[in-house]
Amino acid sequence: MNRAIITAAVIVIGLIVMSMSVIQLANAPEAKLHEPLQTLPEFELTDQFGNRFTKEDLKGKLTVAEFIFTRCPSACPVMSRRTAELYELYKNAPNVQFISITVDPSYDTEEVLQRYAKMHGVTDSRWKFLRHPEISTIVDLCEKGFLMAAEKLPGGHATKFVVIDANGAIRAYFDYNDVHLISSIKLALRQLANDFPEVKTLAHKN
């Protein structure tokens, strides 16, 4: 094999390695953490047991929020499975909480939400299923509070996960079907734990 062929082979191998590195970098999970986009306005919902949940319940905790409805046939089952995975991952971090807000309150009563929570392995207050009897209130909260579309509910609800910091401010959005969703949310929570040292119980090993 002459020197020209060897040189060409080395160049080709180098290009392949470089291409693989670029692809891996492009596919790597990112925290996508932003400066506070918006502090959520005052609101009042109730959880699956009828307990009040307000903006004050976001303070001092890191929160992952989503909008779902229990009889959803498409995105919601996927979203709930992913939230269940995060809920299990952070079982030793009580200052990380998860909230699922129903966009179908006429069907998703407290009893229905209790069954849905149990079906997804919820055993404590770290994951709450929230509702308001007036759908207009949910629309306002979604559009004006979470800055997401809420058209033709329940089917037209937003399918993003929202990460909220310990001041109640929105810091990141993640698509529910992102293959790196879990890793990206973990990175975001880890960064926020650094930004809010008072959130001491977040397990950085996650």
Image: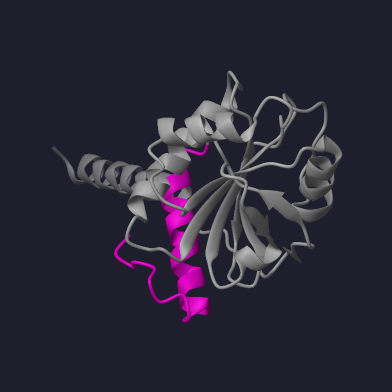
Give the quarter of the image for residue 202: bottom left
| Farthest-out residue, left | 1
Is residue 187 rendered to the left or right of residue 15?
right
| Residue 73: x %, y % from top left | 58, 18
Residue 74 shows in the view:
yes
Is residue 1 rendered to the left or right of residue 164?
left
| Residue 1: x %, y % from top left | 13, 37
Q: Is residue 181 magenta?
A: yes
Residue 24 shows in the view:
no
Which of 189 and 167 lies nearest the eye of the viewer?
167
Classify the position of the C terminus by image quarter: bottom left
Is residue 75 rendered to the left or right of residue 197?
right
| Residue 70: x %, y % from top left | 59, 27
Q: Is residue 124 above or below residue 150?
A: below
Q: Is residue 184 magenta?
A: yes
Q: What coloring was used for the rendering?
A: one colour
Please tell me which residue is depicted at 50% across the width and 31% down the height of the picture.
Answer: 116
Which of 72 and 54 lies nearest the eye of the viewer?
54
| Farthest-out residue, bottom | 197
Give the quarter of the image for residue 5: top left
Please tell me which residue is depicted at 40% across the width and 77% down the height of the picture.
Answer: 200
Q: Is residue 123 above or below residue 104?
A: below
Please tell me which residue is depicted at 56% across the width and 44% down the height of the picture.
Answer: 49
Please tell me which residue is depicted at 82% across the width and 31% down the height of the picture.
Answer: 151
Give the quarter of the image for residue 112: top right
| Farthest-out residue, top | 73
Chain part drawn in magenta: 178-206
Is residue 159 rendered to the left or right of residue 183?
right
| Residue 156: x %, y % from top left | 75, 28
Which of 86 and 22 lies nearest the eye of the viewer?
86
